[in-house]
Amino acid sequence: QVQLVESGGGLVQAGGSLRLSCAASGRTFSSNSMGWFRQAPGKEREFVAGMCWSDRSTYYADSVKGRFTVSIDNAKKLFLQINKLKPKDTAVYYCALAPRFLRGGAYYAERLYDYWGQGTQVTVSS
């Protein structure tokens, strides 16, 4: 079993930055891939960024390229650096873990992720 706990959300003004964290514990494997998703009010959850543990390769949704950066440390903690925040970034952000290698568009497929965190709220004021 794997547990994921997100943190780092909050209220920030447009143009500011936030760094979200996702701590993974439990049984994990080097073949894991992890992703960040977000769900804005009244909208479906969407993929924003992902990373494969083994080779640290990354993948981003086109809508966040250049402003979002995903990274991971040796303690199995996943990060999402969000710069130049915009009101449209307001959402609950979730991390998820897939016990498999993911590449490209596969990161978008929620069915490939077996574990999800509880989410952390990001609110951007204009």
Image (spheres, grey):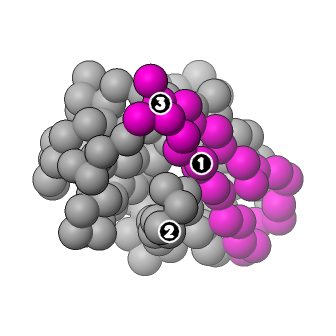
* Earlier-in-chain disc, 2 versus 1: 1
Mark 3 lies on residue: 2
Distance from label 2 to label 1 (Cα)?
Answer: 10 Å
Q: Position of residue 13 (x, y in %)?
A: 83, 64
Q: Is residue 38 magenta?
A: no
Against 17, residue 102 (above or below) is above
Ranked by sequence position, the earlier of labels 3 and 1 is 3
Percent of width and height locating residue 101: 16, 48
What residue is shown with label 2? 73
The answer to whether residue 105 is visible is yes
Q: Which residues lie in the magenta part?
A: 1-27
Q: Residue 97, image x and y in percent?
A: 38, 38
Determine crowd level at label 3: few under 14, some 14-19, many 20+ residues with C-alpha closer than 10 A.
Answer: few
* Vertical placement of residue 87 versus 84, above or below: above
Q: Residue at x 63, y 55 (%)?
A: 21
- Quick one: SS at disc 2? loop
**Are the residues flagged by discs 2 and 1 in contact, CB closer than 8 Å?**
no
Q: Is residue 17 left or right of residue 95?
A: right
Task: Name the amino acid type tagged 1.
Answer: Ala
Q: Amino acid at mark 3?
A: Val
Is 109 placed left or right of 115 in the picture? left
- Residue 9 marker: none
Eyeballing the image, is 13 above or below 114?
below
